[in-house]
Image (cartoon, helix red, strand yellow):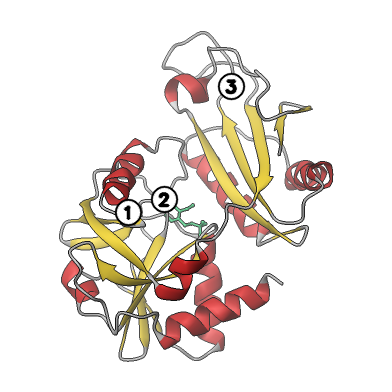
Amino acid sequence: SIAYLNGVFLALDEPALPIEERGHQFGDGVYEVIRIYGGKPFMLDEHLDRLYRSAEAIRLQLDSDRAFFQTIIHQLIDRSGLADLDIYLQVTRGIAPRNHTFPNCPVSISMTAKPSRATPVELKENGAAVWMHPDERWLNCHIKSLNLLPNILAKQVAADNDCLEAVLVRDGYVTEGSSSNIYIVEKGAIRTAPLTNQILAGITRIAVKRIAQELDIPFHEQPFTPEELRNADEAFLTSTTLEVMPVVRYHDDTVIGSGKPGTITQALSERLSALTL
Ligand code: PMP
């Protein structure tokens, strides 16, 4: 594992930031998590696109260009000596005396490179359980902001109840997971919430949508209710770290579909794995 902060490579546990850093004090920043497979970043262009969109959405002026991020990421890969990594990349509004209004200082850019978090193989093979939780987040969920408190609280309730993920519900509809997108399959078609301010535009969602098109599986971007999830033929989650994760159960032991990963879910999962080889 290795880290990068404002021009310097350092060990992960090295003290690095002054107390008055706006990410630390305000959560005033945005981030990305990028997967490295076999030494190669997966969908890096899409991650950087989203990083610039998030920065712009919070009026954070990010002058570093794509080549800068690409270079640092490749240096982290080389220095780590590892082939399969999770890169965490964060940009904050910098280091300045604590005051809500924007400071006049350079942004802080930091990254960590760590061995990929082990994908829960057993869960992937058998499918995961989910916990329904009210979506208590703000109205700018399309921004990949550092402020994750509602996500953390929801995910912890799920974990306390032996569920992998909290599925968030707003105004009677499922939005997304606390750190994933969610989909149902009914009559051979995939359905997932449309891209609005209520969900994060997942990079894995882009991949899955492309794969669905390739495989001629209809991909409908329409919201669904918890009831429709309960009655779906199949359900699955996607994220950079989970990839395609089958969902087979509600917390109360209600079985979704056959109670086993569905055929469309498995086809998407296999095709995605093939892309990362
Ligand atoms: N929604 C939320 C709230 C997330 O935190 C994540 C994980 N970044 C996702 C969806 C999935 O996005 P991605 O496929 O880019 O990892």
Q: Is residue 185 above or below residue 199?
A: below
Q: Which residue is mark 3?
A: 94
The x, y position of residue 194, in whole percent, is 36, 66
Query: Is the C-beta of the residue carrying label 1 under 8 Å from the nearest atom of ligand 1?
Result: no
Q: CA distance from mark 2 to mark 1?
A: 6 Å
The x, y position of residue 130, in whole percent, is 29, 61
> Is residue 223 shown to the viewer in this render?
no
Q: In the visual, does 155 lie left or right of 31? A: left
Q: Which residue is mark 1?
A: 198
Pick whichever of labels 3 and 2 is earlier in the sequence.
3
The x, y position of residue 155, in whole percent, is 33, 47
Quadrant where the N terminus is found in the figure? top right
Q: Label 3 amino acid?
A: Gly
Comparing 276 with 147, the one in front is 276
- In what element is the residue under mark 2? loop
Q: Is residue 66 above or below residue 7?
A: below
Pick whichever of labels 1 and 3 is earlier in the sequence.
3
Q: CA distance from mark 3 to mark 2?
A: 22 Å
Q: Label 2 amino acid?
A: His
Which residue, as the protein is rendered here, is positioned at the far front? Answer: 122
Q: Which residue is mark 2?
A: 142
- In what element is the residue under mark 1? loop
